[in-house]
Amino acid sequence: MTCVVIVGTQWGDEGKGKVVDYFAGKADIVVRFSGGNNAGHTVVVKGKKYAFHLMPCGAVRGKQLIIGNGVVVDPKVLLEEIELLKKDGITPKLSISERAHVIFPYHGTLDELEEQFKGKMKAGTTKRGIGPCYEDKAGRFGLRMCDIVNKEMLKEKIEHLFKLKEKQIQVYGGKFDFTKEQLIEEYTAYGAKLKSCVGDVNLSLNKAIDEGKKVLFEGTQGTMLDIDHGIYPVGTSCNVIAGAACTGAGVGPTKIDTVVGLAKAYVSRVGEGPLPTELLDETGEYIRKKGAEFGTTTGRPRRVGWLDMPALKYACRVNGINWLAITKLDVLAGLEKVKICTAYTIDKKVLEDIPSSCELLSRCKPVYKEMKGWKGFAEGQAEGVAKNGFDELPKELKDYVAEVSKLSNTSPCLISIGPGREETIILKDVFGK
Ligand code: GDP
Ligand code: IMO
Ligand code: MG
């Protein structure tokens, strides 16, 4: 296997950072293909925590890194991440697609204003300007990395766009806080700093694939947040499913060998929108606390709920998932009973599949299968437990994994029982034969 895509099957924050870092051990190149700094991916190695927003998580292992054309880049955030890594003694080997679109401060302002305007219909965005940047991309008003590394081009395009952005912000009753000169100066400086990393990365990426290099495509968000296949309109503004690895990096679908779907042992959601299995009781509070379910990007408390099988089955379908990575099984430990939502009911009818309409989903009530919980491991024991392998795990935990596997019709390749790199059990080497 040479090309492996890792995607979230839920509403994001499934543990992509941890799993990408793990599999990056065997990869040559790690590629981001979607989203922007709305993503927050955490890697924990020997107690040291790294939180990435734009930098591919293969950075910690010193791998070659690519930010593909499908990503929207806030250069300020990216430069901060590069500096932080350098302080930790890591100089990231990063290339950025010249086709990737760039986030400007007016995108952030518009993000806030659009959310205010939408009121009850808002998605609860991360306010990082992601949606307005993708709007500009689709509207062909966007500026790309190739523009900010070219001072004349940047100046010409900003001069042209400035009036439009000013008007858009005024339509929402907002104030345009920037001068043309400021924007040109700031972004020329970013362009100059990033210039050496910017290029036609898809050329080198495809060459590397043809040479048999192992490439890991790092998904962002989760299937339920995909602009087409997620719960519209409360998701994000781009495609995040496995197919987006092709469009967001410029790689043909025939090159992708394997798709790994990431599922947390329960679900979480930051932001608005229906979450049929949401737990608003003390069990929810227990899971949120124990799982440290607070946004990596915004710090917002995450809503949590039992594992949602109609959503997971759907994710397996639209992503073409071959293998499942199940994370945070340690968080459910200590509960007497755990539940899996196997279907929904709506108006007394049973629904096995997730509906595409946000309105219908918000009326869905979960049907649960109850299972026995498992005992927790003592503090600091997870690494040792992981070393002992899957067979030595508590029977109830193994039963839970088997049930998830059966209901989703996929096999687990990785089991995660703690945030640390070593708190992991591998059942299938995804880069192996
Ligand atoms: P991502 O957006 O999918 O990369 O996930 P986040 O990094 O936003 O959130 C996942 C959180 O769970 C991070 O704090 C991880 O360190 C942590 N985490 C990942 N896997 C596990 C696990 O198996 N157990 C526990 N307790 N924490 C985990
Ligand atoms: P990772 O990659 C969880 C959610 C926001 C909001 C909606 C739209 O860390 O899993 P946006 O700022 O993208 O316009 O917000 O999507 N959202 C995420 N939730 N994890 C993420 O990324 C997310 N990225 C966006 O909370 O509901
Ligand atoms: Mg996250």
Image: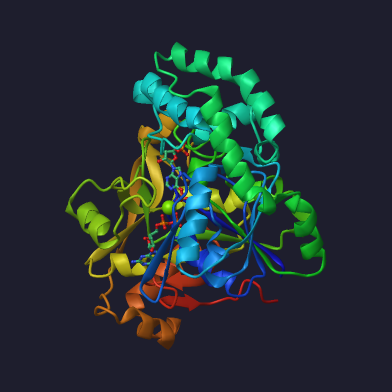
Question: Horizontal placement of 378 versus 103: left or right?
Answer: left
Q: Where 177 sits versus 221, above or below?
A: above
Q: Quadrant of residue 49?
A: bottom left
Residue at 41%, 87% in the rendered image: 388
Q: Where 277 sits versus 395, above or below?
A: above
Residue at 70%, 44% in the rendered image: 98
Residue 266: percent from the left, percent from the top?
A: 36, 57
Quarter of the rendering occupied by the C terminus = bottom right
Question: For the view shown, which residue lies furthest in the bottom direction?
Answer: 388
Quarter of the rendering occupied by the N terminus = bottom right
Q: Is residue 359 visible?
A: yes
Residue 138: percent from the left, percent from the top?
A: 64, 28
Q: Where 307 sits versus 257, above or below?
A: above
Residue 176: percent from the left, percent from the top?
A: 45, 19
Compare residues 318 and 159 and report the one nearer the observer.
159
Q: Where 306 sits versus 238, above or below?
A: below
Compare residues 399 and 11 and report the one nearer the observer.
11
Question: Horizontal placement of 151 versus 375: left or right?
Answer: right
Residue 163: percent from the left, percent from the top?
A: 57, 15
Name the colouring of the figure.
rainbow
Q: Is residue 228 visible?
A: no
Residue at 58%, 41% in the rendered image: 189
